[in-house]
Image (cartoon, coloured by chain):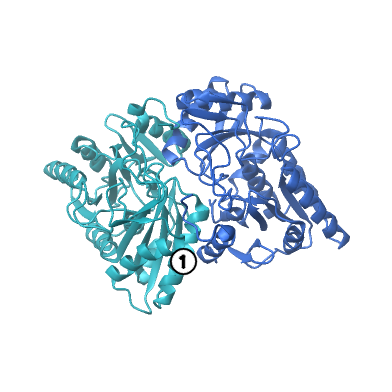
Chain colours: A blue, B cyan
Amino acid sequence: MKKLLNDPANAVADSLAGFALAHADIIQVHHDPAYVTRVGGATTGKVGLVSGGGAGHEPLHTGFVGDGMLDVAVPGAVFTSPTPDQILPALQAADGGAGVLAIVKNYTGDVLNFDLAVELAETEGLDVATVLVNDDVAVEDSTYTAGRRGVAGTLCVEKIAGAAAQQGGDLADVTGVAHRVVDNVRSMGVAVTACTVPHVGAPSFDLPGDQLEIGIGIHGEPGRRRVKAVPADEVTQMLLDPVADDLELSAGERVLLFVNGMGGTPASELYVVYGRARRLLEQRGVTVARSLVGSYVTSLEMQGASVTVLRLDDELAALWDAPVHTAALRW
Amino acid sequence: MKKLLNDPANAVADSLAGFALAHADIIQVHHDPAYVTRVGGATTGKVGLVSGGGAGHEPLHTGFVGDGMLDVAVPGAVFTSPTPDQILPALQAADGGAGVLAIVKNYTGDVLNFDLAVELAETEGLDVATVLVNDDVAVEDSTYTAGRRGVAGTLCVEKIAGAAAQQGGDLADVTGVAHRVVDNVRSMGVAVTACTVPHVGAPSFDLPGDQLEIGIGIHGEPGRRRVKAVPADEVTQMLLDPVADDLELSAGERVLLFVNGMGGTPASELYVVYGRARRLLEQRGVTVARSLVGSYVTSLEMQGASVTVLRLDDELAALWDAPVHTAALRW
C-alpha cells in the first residue's frame, strides 16, 4: 500500500488536523470525541444540521460544514460508523434552540448509532428529527445495509436542507424539505478500480484488470454485475437508465444532474460521463436545469463515478441556488 | 487501460463537450480550433488573459476561465502543446482593446507555439505580453523543458494576474504583477503512481510498487530521485524544504501554501501533506496567511501531490482574495 499517510491508524486524525488548519476561517475540529463544527458554533434560533458516517468519503461530510449547509459533521474511522458517544456531543453542539436535524446515510451501523445518540439527546431535552438517505438504486440489502444504500444524493439533502435552515425554516419545515429531497433523488455508481482502507492495507475487493463493477457501493460493496470495460457512453447509460426509471421521470420535468467522482478519477473523465448522461436525459424530454460535476462523495482513491439525478421544483431549485460557504462547496 | 472515456482519440473533445454543457453560465467552448472563452467574450477595456497547454491537467486551464481569472484557455491534445493556429484565435478572442497577457508554462513546445502565435497576433496589430511560469524547483532541463518547468504555481499567476486585470490594471500593471508572482512562487511534487495517456494506452513511466518519484513533473517527467515509500511527513519535507530554500524564505514572512493533488489522490491525504508542510513553514518562522488544498493542476489519474509556496505581500494577498467565479475556483 502506497499512500500519502503516516501511521495508518492515525489517518483520520492526521487528515482532520490538516483540514482544521487549512479552513480555520470556516470550521473547528474537536478531538476525543472527533466532530467538526462551524466556527462560532451553533446559530441561535436556527435549526441545527448534523451529518456523519465513516471517513474515507471526503469531502463528505466534513467539507460541507459552513454557512448554508451543515452545522456539525461527525466522522468515524475509515468506512466505519461514528460511535454514539461521538454523535451525542455532535448533536448537542448543533443545537441553537430550534432543534436539530440528523441526516443519516442508510447503513445498519450508522442508523443504529445515530438512533441511540438521538435517544440519549432527547432524554436530555433536545428536539431531534432524523432523515435517512437511501438514494442508491443499484441494490437492496447489500453489505452493511438493510434496504437501499445512501450515497452521493446525501450532498443534495445536506445542501437543500441546509439552505432551508439558513433561511429560517423551523424543524418541521427543514425536515419536510429533506424528506422531499430523499423522495426525489436517485444515484448509481461504477467502480473502475478498487480502493484500499489504510488500516487494512489491501484492496477492499478484487476487480480484475478488464472489468467494471456496475452499481458499486461507496465502501466497495458489490453492485449489480461486472462487465468487461466498455466505452464511457455505454457505462453511463447503465447508470443513468436505472436512476431515471426508478424516479419515473417524465418528459417536461426539470432535474439536477450530479456526476460524482469516486476519488481517483480525473475531472476530464467526469465531464465525459456528464455529457452522455445529459444527452440521455434530454432524449427523455427531461431538462437539466442544474449541474454539479466533481469528486464530492468519494471512496478513498477508488477510480469510478456515480450519476445522481434530483427531480426539481421551484422551491428545491431555489434552495439549491442559495449561497453556501463551506470548504468543499461554495457559491 | 480502463478509463471512463470513449474513443481515446476524442478524449479531449468529448470532455470539453461535457464541460461546455455543465458550465454554460460561465464558459463557451469553440471547436476547430479548440479554445474556451468566457460567456459574452472579451470585456471591452480590460486586459485579456490567455493561458493554455496540453490537456490532462484539468481543471487547469479551462476550469479557470471566468470573472477574476482567465478570459480564454487553449487546450492542446493530452500532454501536447496547443498549435499556433489554435493559439492565435485564442489571443484574438481575449482582446478587449487593452492588450492581452499570455501566461505560458515553461515547456519547449508551449514556448515555441505561443511565441509564434504572439508574433502573428502582433503583425495583426494586437498588443501581447507574455509571462513564462517556471516554478518547479525539482530539476533544470527535464524532458520537454529547457530551464525549470511550470507546474502548480501557474494557478497562482492566473488568479492574481486575473484579479489585477479585473480591477482595471493596464497591460504593464498586469504583466508586472504576473512577473512578481513568478518571482515569488516555487513548487515541487511527488508521484505515488504513474498515469496513462489515453491515446498511448500504457503508463507514461514505470514506478515500482514500493517507490515514490520525488520531484516528478506534471507529465511524468523524471524528478530528483526515487525513494522507497516513507510516511507522508517525510515525503512532505522532501518537497517543502527545497521549495522554501529556493525561495530563501525568512522568519517573519507571510506565504500562501497550496497543496495540490495530481488527480488520483483523495483530499484526505492532501490534508495530511498540508498539515505537515504548514508545521515545517511555521518552524522556519514563516506565517501561512492563505491556503489552498485540492486537485487543481493534475496529471490525469496520477496519484501524488505537489507543494507550492507563494511569498505574499499586501498587494498579492489582496489580489488572491479578490472574487473569482470560474468552474473550478470560486469565492
Could you tell whether A296 is left or right of A161 in the image?
Answer: left
Vertical arrangement, residue A26 with respect to residue B122, above or below: below
**Residue B37 visible:** yes
Badge 1: chain ID: B
Q: Residues within 10 Å of mark 1 (few under 14, many from 20)?
A: many
Could you tell whether A218 is left or right of B11 in the image?
Answer: right
Q: Nearer the viewer, residue B84 or B110?
A: B110
* Residue A4 at x, y percent in the picture: 46, 55
User: In the structure shown, which secondary structural element does the residue marked by tag 1 occupy?
Assistant: helix
| Residue found 55% across the figure and 65% down from its top | A17
| Residue found 31% across the figure and 42% down from its top | B205
Could you tell whether B192 is left or right of A182 in the image?
Answer: left
**Residue A70 visible:** no
Q: Nearer the viewer, residue A117 or A285?
A: A117
Could you tell whether A173 is left or right of A296 in the image?
Answer: right
Q: Quadrant of residue B114?
A: top left
Q: Amino acid at mark 1?
A: Arg
Vertical arrangement, residue B200 with respect to residue B171, above or below: above
| Residue found 35% across the figure and 33% down from its top | B198
Residue at the outermost right position: A123
Residue at the outermost left position: B123
* Residue A297 at x, y percent in the picture: 58, 44
Q: Nearer the viewer, residue A54 or A307?
A: A54
Disc 1 target residue: B276
* Residue A193 at x, y percent in the picture: 50, 37
